Amino acid sequence: MTDLSTTIADRTFSNCMMNAAGVRCADENDLNQLIASPAGAYVTKSATPNVREGNPEPRMKSLPGGCINSMGLPNHGLDYYLDFVLKDQAARPDKTNLLSIAGTTLEDNLAMLHKVADSDFNGFVELNLSCPNVPGKPQVGYDFDRVREILTQVFAFYDKPLGVKLPPYFDLVHFDQIAAVLNDFPLTFVNSINSVGNGLVIDPNAERVAIKPKGGFGGIGGTFIKPTALANVRGLSLRLKPEIAIIGTGGVMNGTDVFEHILCGASMVQVGTQFGFEGTRIFKRLSKELSAIMAAKGYQSIDDFKGKLKTFDD
């Protein structure tokens, strides 16, 4: 028998797979379906302080093996998601889930974290520093001094488990620089990566961009981004202090993809684009596929291979 459970910050999750924020997690119906699924946890849609409509349509286009989107953080507002997770926590006190927040300003993020800190929520908060799809708002995760400033202010008062969702980095020195910042704070986890920002997809027949917001620029997800996601999980796993777990996200289509994320150092794996295509049944499929890979290799738990990627120098 293979064991797909995982542990982050002394919290045990029955399955190492879950959804990624932004896909099929925007309302109670979506979240209840995740609760009923084999997923080890759920994360809520990234919340802003108030209800947000998001960007104009069309704002998402499916592609072979992926998608481009510029959703613009449509969500029901923090109170909606905080109320849901508190009710779920009361009903299932042995479960840990993630509440995602993504203010468009530092002041918004601090105000939301104060509200969470003052509540009874004892799950994980995922602070999104990497949304590429809000017009006029840069990805905070690329400004390392700004990340340090934000985390300094956050941890001046916030003492519950908290992680950050990061954009993809493309230079080894950037792994060094962001890890030097993150290692100075009591983070529970980092989630790597968000979509690859500001790609462009064209409809050659119409000679027009595929989506409306930002002149057609949007985040790329799906199988295209797996090599970048694996590189970021690996790069951070080699640099972050052991107390900071890694949640791997990006390009997960099958059990092999999950296996590779864990091999690179991920303790948990989130599924976004393909979850959007398949719905919650994907977690049963991925669990079966990952279990088969582990059994064929003689692995009984994910700890048997987590972070044990070999190089030609080994």
Image (tube, rainbow, N blue to C red):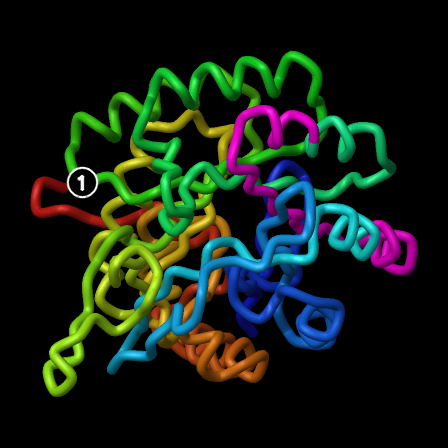
Judge whether residue 202 is colored magenta: no
Where residue 22 appears, as percent x and y from the top left, is 52, 60
The residue located at (48%, 84%) in the rendering is 278
Q: Disc 1 designates what residue?
A: 170
Whether 294 is drawn above or below 301: the answer is below
Whether 133 is drawn above or below 243: the answer is below
In-image side of 55 versus 200 (left or right): right
Specify the farthest residue to the bottom: 205
Where residue 36 appears, as percent x and y from the top left, is 73, 76
On the image, which quarter does residue 191 sit in?
Answer: top left
Q: Residues within 10 Å of mark 1 (few under 14, many from 20)?
A: few
Whether 93 is drawn above or below 123: the answer is below
In-image side of 231 versus 58 (left or right): left
Viewer-proximal residue, 261 or 84? Answer: 84
Judge whether residue 109 is colored magenta: yes
- Magenta part of the protein: which range? 86-111
Where residue 105 appears, as percent x and y from the top left, is 52, 30
In-image side of 300 versus 256 (left or right): right
- Secondary-structure class at tag 1: loop
Specify the farthest residue to the right: 90
In-image side of 65 versus 134 (left or right): left
Viewer-proximal residue, 118 or 55? Answer: 55
- Specify the quadrant that holds the N terminus: bottom right
On the image, which quarter does residue 314 sit in?
Answer: top left
Query: How many labels were placed on the picture?
Result: 1
Q: Amino acid at mark 1?
A: Phe
The residue located at (35%, 60%) in the rendering is 213
Where residue 199 appears, as percent x and y from the top left, is 21, 58
